[in-house]
Image (cartoon, rainbow, N blue to C red):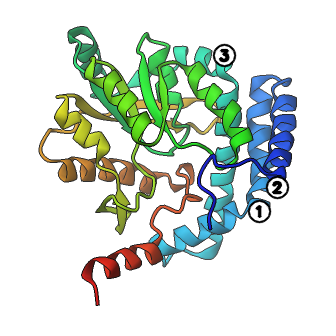
Amino acid sequence: MKRRPNEGRTRQDWAVDRALRLLIGSLLRLPYRWRVPLMGAVTRLLVGPLAGYNRRAMENLAYVFPDMPRERRRAIARAVSDNVGRTLIENYSTPELMARMAENPVEGPGVAALEQARASGRPVVLVTGHFGNYEAPRAALTARGYSIGGLYRPMNNAFFNEHYVATMERIGGPIFPRGRRGLAGLVKHVRGGGFAVLLIDQFMYDGALLDFMGKPAPTALSAAEMALKYDALLVPFYGARNRDGLSFTITVEAPVPHSDAETMTQALNDSLDARVRRDPAQWLWIHRRWKPHRQSMRAAARTGP
């Protein structure tokens, strides 16, 4: 039986956590401009191949882009692992990340909508994906005085989860573990006129079967449902990594018009889809986003013999 996230503490988990603590702790002693690309290189050259990240990314790329040449898929997979490493050490470098995001411009048609919502006390549900550094836009808004709560998925490794959650908490705003109790905490925050952030690009077995990258993808409707229930703005935002590998283009898109939860969520998928197609190396292709085998099992269970 597969172990549930954050359930149990094995010796292997402890060993992996100690190795990661040593690596992260050592890199944090280096100047920011060195530690970020170095962690990217370590993940691209060592962690990605050993952990199977590169293989999984290539499989997902082949599923979505069957005509893409193998060498192109390989190059994207390596770049994905590099971005994973950079993102991880950036999020552990909270003081430096926050200082940089305070100076980093925030652009897009949704900026004025956020300012108006904050002034009027209207809640906002911000939505992003595992693209670029997904914490960068939250850090940029936090540095500008916004308090943004969020949900997170606990790591399978409970030892690592303890300090990883602490990095998210330091960026600002209350965060809650995914699940019924965590969602209740986030709802309370939103109901009081707060801002929340949710990630839209994780496989949800019981989610609505919507399109993402041209494939059916079970997707949670919770962001749109929350926006409808509490009359909150539903706003996509992103932190795309720039070519220098250290700075970001922080974009707040226009709010998604209220209609019904599935239509609104499909609009969120389409927003992320467009960004991934423009720069596929910035999205987390190592996620098991589609799981076509499990989808076919779900379809069979619903239709019956």
Q: Residue 49 carries which label?
A: 1
Q: Is residue 79 above or below residue 32?
A: below
According to the image, label 2 marks what residue?
Answer: 46
Instruction: Provide the secondary structure element on which disc 3 rests.
Output: helix
Q: Is residue 229 above or below residue 52?
A: above
| 3 and 1 marks in contact (CB < 8 Å) | no
Left or right position of 154 against 36? left
Residue at 87 percent across and 35 percent down: it is 22
Residue kind at label 3, given as amino acid type: Pro
Q: Mark 1 packing: few (<14 Cα in 10 Å), some, or many (20+)?
A: some
Residue closest to the eye, 245 or 238:
238
Residue kind at label 2, given as amino acid type: Leu
According to the image, label 3 marks what residue?
Answer: 95
x, y percent for residue 11: 84, 51
Left or right position of 260 against 51? left
Q: Quadrant location of residue 96?
A: top right
Instruction: Provide the secondary structure element on which disc 1 rests.
Output: helix
x, y percent for residue 202: 45, 53
Left or right position of 116 against 88? left
x, y percent for residue 109: 27, 28
Residue closest to the eye, 225 or 182:
182
Q: Quadrant location of residue 167?
A: top right
Residue kind at label 1, given as amino acid type: Pro
Q: In this view, does 259 lie above or below 209?
A: above
Q: Which of marks 2 and 3 is nearer the N terminus?
A: 2
Q: Earlier in the sequence, mark 3 or mark 1?
A: 1
